[in-house]
Image (cartoon, rainbow, N blue to C red):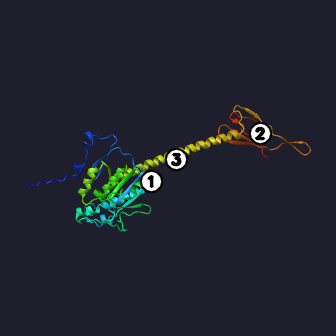
Amino acid sequence: MTSTSTTKRKYHELIIDGPPLYCNNEQSSSTVSSEVDGQSHRHRNCPPLDASKTALLIVDVQPEYWSECPTVRHDFPNFPSHISSLIQNCRTQNIQRIIWVRADYSYEHSPWLHQFARLHEGKIPPIVRPSSKWEEFATPLDGEMIITKTSWSSTSGGTGLLDTLKQDGIDTVLVCGLITSVCVQHSAFGVFEAGYRTILVTDACADRGRERHEAALALYGDYMYELRSVESLRLELEEQQQRVVVVESDSVIEKKKKKEMMMENENEGAGSDSEEVMPSSIRKVSVALPSYKDGGGNNVGHRDKKMMIKSESNDSLTSATSVSSIEDHGVTVARACAEE
């Protein structure tokens, strides 16, 4: 009897890139290309990321699936640094919500566990009771949401995740964590099915073997969810933040200009109401200062008075104490006020 050997297909051979999904392998004009895990990916119809409408979903990063799971650690030695960088980037860019998901599996509230235990015959511990411990490279901060799931998907079993996303006005969910082909994949499915733009951060995920990880991404990457690396996502978030700063700066400048114009208009209006406007055609003005008489009725001369003269050329005020006549083609008397 001849045995048939099956050659394992490489990651790039599994990617769906032609008919019936994409007729004639055509690329849309709105397609964006990026490099993820050494492979080129095409992201179709991609709107810019808005941090205020984005959530990061961190799935099952707990000791049961990392520090206590050597099969995962073996092929993904850089996972801790990658996911730590992703979390820090999201915090720095002030994304709307960071959500930590923890697995809590037991026979009383996880019906699927019986079949799972039968299929794997104890090779994978079926019961998962999370402790209060977190991995050093991935620990939630105060104010970051923590939810517990009893199934593979973060959206089923009454987790309340979808309600939170809706209340927060989220439109995009970044998914990362453990295990790529199981709970990460199912959580991405649930988010996608609920209508959210779903982005899986490939190098911030890990699996029980590199091939399982790559096969999962090849089947559904850029088909159901978009693929990004930690670095490409960082660049996208920073570029969008720069665009927001520019827009806000322009808005502040525009508001300042409008305020200055309003103040200028108000000042002009106040001036026209309080000042006596004299015709600019005046060429010669004679001003007689009042005479001062003593107690006996004798005229003793002009009492010192002040007159304010306003120049048309520079809008400045000039004072005079003894003016009998003014003859200046560039000067108009705008206001005359006598002061003691």
Q: Nearer the viewer, mark 3 or mark 2?
A: 3
Q: Which of marks 2 and 1 is in front?
A: 1
Task: Specify the amino acid type for callout 1.
Answer: Gln
Marks 1/3 in contact by CB < 8 Å: the verdict is no
Which residue in the protein does label 1 denote?
Answer: 167
Q: Which residue lies furthest to the right in this view?
A: 296
Near-viewer residue (335 or 106): 106
Q: Nearer the viewer, mark 1 or mark 3?
A: 1
Let me know if residue 93 appears in the view.
Answer: no
Marks 3/2 in contact by CB < 8 Å: the verdict is no
CA gap between label 2 and label 1 equals: 77 Å
Near-viewer residue (51 or 267): 51
CA gap between label 3 and label 2 equals: 50 Å
Which residue in the protein does label 3 denote?
Answer: 252
Task: Specify the amino acid type for callout 3.
Answer: Val
Residue 175 locus on image (x, y percent): 35, 55
Residue at the image position 26 percent from the left and 50 percent from the top: 219
Residue 288 locus on image (x, y percent): 80, 37
Estimate how packed mark 3 is, as few (under 14), some (14 to 19) or many (20 or more) residues with alpha carbons within 10 Å: few
Residue 323: which numbered mark, if any? 2
Please tell me which of labels 2 and 1 falls first in the chain.
1
